[in-house]
Image: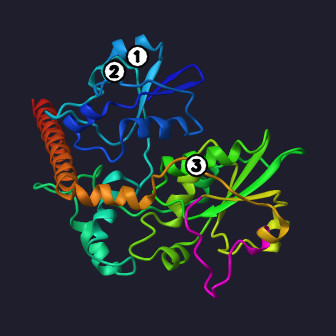
Amino acid sequence: MCRHGSKLIIPPHPVGEISQHKGPPVFTQDERYKMVRAIKWVDEIVEGAPYVTTLETLDKYTSDFCVHGDDITLTVDGKDTYEEVKRSGRYRECKRTQGVSTTDLVGRMLLMTKAHHSNIVNYQQHTDNFGKGPKGHSPWTGVSQFLQTSQKIIQFASGQEPQPGDTIIYVAGAFDLFHIGHVDFLEAVSRLSDKPYVIVGLHFDQEVNRYKGKNYPIMNVHERTLSVLACRYVSEVVIGAPYAVTRELLDHFKVDLVCHGKTEVHPDKDGSDPYAEPRKKGILHTVDSMNSLTTDSIVQRIIKNRLLFEARNQKKEAKEMAVIQAMKRREEEKGKERAQAVNH
């Protein structure tokens, strides 16, 4: 991730290099490009960027420095992918969001073949064991609990209210494992107006589990909130929106248009149509995203390649643990050298 002036440039790596150094990616190359373009803080992406970031790469794209999270990124042979830019002083680091990782999400999806969403004991046992290397537990790959705070929401939220002339559009759903199917839908919704103000109503976990069943949602409501807020086509999120789009909700947000995709609309608990009110008012619009990707299809990708993804996470953590052990040995050696210098 490189920053030039006030411009944020993101270089997603090619699928081949990811497979070589980390293991199989969950999304295809085109899917990842489209997802990154939809992140509201991204100005430009560099397609096919090398996995190992070099000074040559930074100079080629006139970038001042490179930014990564505080988790280590290693090549297939265990080398730091940012070693060169770190040595030159053109590397910056930001703290990653605790408790949110690909490893954990993959673990939750693999769990769907074993237990139900409500089986917390089995889930915890699974996450405690998932992805652990042979020599301990890596702080970067391991599972930790995600804790939502008001500060996190403020960092992601736009903070902008509807302006005169805006078309206030309301959509609702689970938006679980936020993916390009969701992105294409929200982009299509935003194109319905020259000045769209898109409000996304996110259902609570229990509600999602009621109408989707199985182990859904994969991501809890706090994780789903940040994922949706990061999308450039979203203006506001209602956390824990009611399943039925009521008159009160429409009046409160002064909604001009309610949109739904071509996916199935499940009835409310009492069997009623959750979109009866906007349908009656003539403001319900069906939007075709022209994208058939669903959360279910992503889960099926993981389950189909179960062994590959389990091996991916175990190898990744084993490499990280080797680095941690080497760092510890280096610190111990430095400590001994300092002690010997003091004694002499």
Q: Which of 43 and 274 is in front in this view?
A: 274
How many angstroms separate mark 2 from mark 3 (CA)?
A: 41 Å
For the rendered model, the colour scheme is rainbow
Q: Mark 3: which secondary structure?
A: loop
Q: How many marks?
A: 3
Q: Which amino acid does label 3 sit on?
A: Ser
Q: What residue type is labelled 1?
A: Leu
Whole-percent x, y for residue 189 in the image: 68, 48
Dominant SS of magenta comes to loop
How many angstroms separate mark 1 from mark 3 (CA)?
A: 36 Å
Q: Mark 2: which secondary structure?
A: helix
Q: Residue 74 carries which label?
A: none
How many angstroms separate mark 2 from mark 1 (CA)?
A: 9 Å
Q: Give the magenta part as a residue range.
A: 262-278
Mark 2 Cα-neighbour bin, 10 Å: few <14, some 14–19, many ≥20: many
Q: Quadrant of the N terminus?
A: top left
Q: What residue type is labelled 2?
A: Val
Q: Where 109 falls versus 156 (above or below)?
A: below
Q: Where 207 falls versus 251 (above or below)?
A: below
Q: Which of 50 and 153 is in front in this view?
A: 50
Q: At x 19% / y 31%, what residue is drawn?
A: 79
**Residue on which disc 3 sits:** 289
Q: Nearer the viewer, residue 261 or 201?
A: 261
Mark 3 Cα-neighbour bin, 10 Å: few <14, some 14–19, many ≥20: some
**Residue on which disc 2 sits:** 85
**Residue on which disc 1 sits:** 58
Is residue 230 shown to the viewer in this render?
Answer: no
Q: Mark 1: which secondary structure?
A: helix
Q: In which quarter of the image is the C terminus?
A: top left
